[in-house]
């Protein structure tokens, strides 16, 4: 492994580790205090956005309560899968070619995921 790739690997490990630590810490704070980042969309309009309930869903997942996680936000698996896809794709491109973060290919799949998220945000307020 070349020095450039080794440096990118160490940097990537540090970044992903920091992101994982922050996300876990936030989920634990929500789990044990019940307080999370308030949704501006919900506080201003009284409607739930497509991400409302993700903090509580993550807190439920920490205690392996899948029913509650789905009750808080039914499409959390989509968010999780998309986040992992983006992270793995970006990590691979960065390690192999030194490319900075970009949306993964195929691009149409990004639009489909964003469309489903948008549709869920609309539907959940009228059902």
Image: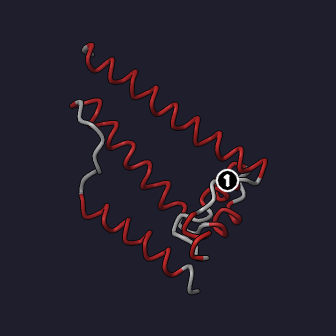
Q: Nearer the viewer, residue 109 or 101?
A: 101
The residue at the far right in this view is 32
Q: Is residue 114 left or right of residue 22?
A: left
Which residue appears farthest toward the top when viewing the image? 3
Q: Give percent across and percent down for residue 117.
A: 44, 69
Q: Could you tell me which residue is drawn at 32 percent across and 44 percent down? A: 89
User: Is residue 53 positioned above or below 7 on the image?
Assistant: below
**Quadrant of image for the C terminus:** bottom right
Percent position of residue 25, x then y: 65, 39
Q: Is residue 111 left or right of residue 70?
A: left
Residue under label 1: 36
Q: Which residue corresponds to the image point at 61% horizontal and 76% vertical from the top-left?
A: 46
Q: Is residue 64 left or right of residue 21?
A: right
User: Percent from the top left, x then y, of residue 105?
Assistant: 24, 53
Residue farthest to the left, as pictured: 97
Say whether residue 51 is left or right of residue 100: right
Which of the 4 quarters of the picture holds residue 41?
bottom right
Vertical order, 22 against 107 (above or below): above
Disc 1 crowd rating (10 Å Cα; few below 14, some 14-19, many 20+) is some
Residue 45 image point, x, y percent = 57, 76
**What residue is at 46 percent from the left and 34 percent from the top?**
16
Extreme residue toward the front, this view: 44
Q: Residue at x 58, y 69 (%)?
A: 74
The N terminus appears in which quarter of the rendering? top left
Figure coloring: secondary structure
Say which of 88 and 16 sits in front: 16
Report helix, strand or loop for mark 1: loop
Say which quarter of the image contains residue 21.
Answer: top right
- Total number of numbered labels? 1
């Amino acid at each position: 492994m070349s020095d450039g790739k080794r440096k990118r690997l160490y940097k990537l490990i540090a970044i992903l580790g920091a992101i994982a630590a922050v996300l876990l810490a936030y989920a634990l704070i929500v789990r044990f205090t019940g307080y999370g980042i308030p949704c501006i969309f919900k506080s201003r309009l009284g409607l739930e956005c497509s991400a409302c309930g993700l903090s509580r869903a993550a807190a439920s997942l920490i205690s392996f309560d899948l029913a509650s996680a789905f009750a808080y936000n039914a499409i959390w698996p989509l968010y999780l899968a998309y986040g992992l896809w983006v992270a793995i794709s970006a990590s691979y491109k960065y390690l192999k070619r030194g490319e900075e973060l970009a949306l993964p290919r195929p691009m149409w799949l990004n639009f489909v995921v964003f469309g489903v998220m948008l549709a869920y945000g609309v539907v959940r307020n009228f059902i």
